Amino acid sequence: MAGQSETPMFMSFLFTIIFGLCILNASADLQRFAHPSKHDGSLSFLVLGDWGRRGAYNQSEVAFQMGKVGEKLDIDFVVSTGDNFYDDGMTSEHDKAFEESFTQIYTKKSLQKKWYSVLGNHDYRGDAEAQLSPFLRQIDSRWICLRSFIVESELVEIFFVDTTPFVEEYFTDPGEHKYDWRGISPQKSYITNLLKDLELAMRESTATWKIVVGHHAIRSVGHHGDTRELITQLLPILQANNIDFYMNGHDHCLEHISDTNSPIQFLTSGAGSKAWRGDIDQMNQRGLNFFYDGQGFMSVKLTETDATIHFYDVSGQVLHRLSSSKQLHSPM
Ligand SMILES: *[C@@H]1O[C@H](CO)[C@@H](O)[C@H](O)[C@H]1NC(C)=O
């Protein structure tokens, strides 16, 4: 049994841990954005990927339906899974594509919320730093795009991960494409530091729901399929830290795949414009619940106990839904 004499030692031990965590916290690079929940404690948002084509390929039709669903759910923000501007990202922060593919397309009132965005591989083929520039917020204040960052509310922590630098092929075999690797090289230490920051932030998270957003799929049966580098490097961290959902774009489709080794659900929302690729991986369909080759988007509603996710097509019809529940934690 602990005697009185051991109490000061325990206190100093505790102090060391807390102090240590503060230092670690201070060294972590991931910028945080606090986003309050609604008064009833819920939070809802839309998830869209692979979209910026000046309205073409049904981008405007998807935007219209997002506006309707956004209004119905009274969404708090929008998440973009990347490939924001086709074909080759933005040429500079003055590129008119920003207004023509974003501001003038997502015009509905319900979509006038923060848009939290990551970069996709196509965005890296232009001036990647242009999309990260705070200057864009003077043109459209909704735009929040960083490489990797965290959005947190009382209910949820959303970890946005810059997945393009993980993909070896873009470095070793870029073909005719030029990637803007400013701020990324050396690739190895960029990835190592990012994984370290993510792991620490996830481990410390006390949020009820933990969601990770990236551009590339971990698991996909679509055209690009699984991303090998993410399976080996990112997935183990997600599995070890009780992540509920991994959300991505890259494949121009809608998908729901269950991890076979953990409760993680893989959700692809990369159908913001050009779709109908017409190929599906017949080989690796482990855990596959839903696949849709056409345009659409996803909605997420979170409460303290429930997550409800819907996939919609270009006419706003619900194609697939999933829900997940949690026991309320007893206060510590
Ligand atoms: C737009 O959506 C409709 C309905 O899904 C589809 O039939 C049509 O092919 C789509 N257009 C393009 C260019 O993808």
Image (cartoon, grey):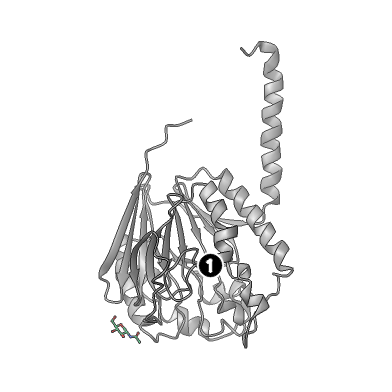
Look at mark 1 in the image and give the residue it sits on.
227
* Residue at 40% across, 87% down: 56
Identify the secondary structure beneath mark 1: loop
Is residue 298 toward the left or the right of residue 164 in the image?
left
Is residue 273 toward the left or the right of residue 122 in the image?
left
Can you name the residue that lies furthest to the right here? 186
Corner quadrant of residue 145: bottom right
* Residue at 58% across, 75% down: 131
Is residue 3 toward the left or the right of residue 279 in the image?
right
Q: Position of residue 326 (x, y in %)?
A: 37, 43
Q: Position of residue 224 (x, y in %)?
A: 48, 74
Residue flagged by tag 1: what amino acid is it? Thr
Question: Which one is in front, 6 or 102?
Answer: 6
Picture layout, residue 57 above or below residue 208: below
* Residue at 30% across, 60% down: 321
Picture layout, residue 326 above or below residue 128: above
**Residue 180 seen in the current view:** no
Picture layout, residue 42 above or below residue 281: above
Q: Quadrant of the N terminus?
A: top right
Is residue 87 toward the left or the right of residue 105 in the image?
right
Corner quadrant of residue 177: bottom right
Q: Please rate how many residues cluster around mark 1, counting C-alpha atoms within 10 Å: few if below 14, some from 14 to 19, many from 20.
A: some
Q: Position of residue 272 (x, y in %)?
A: 40, 76
* Residue at 37% across, 39% down: 327
Q: Position of residue 128 (x, y in %)?
A: 62, 76
Where ligand 1 lies, by image quadrant?
bottom left
Corner quadrant of residue 61: bottom left
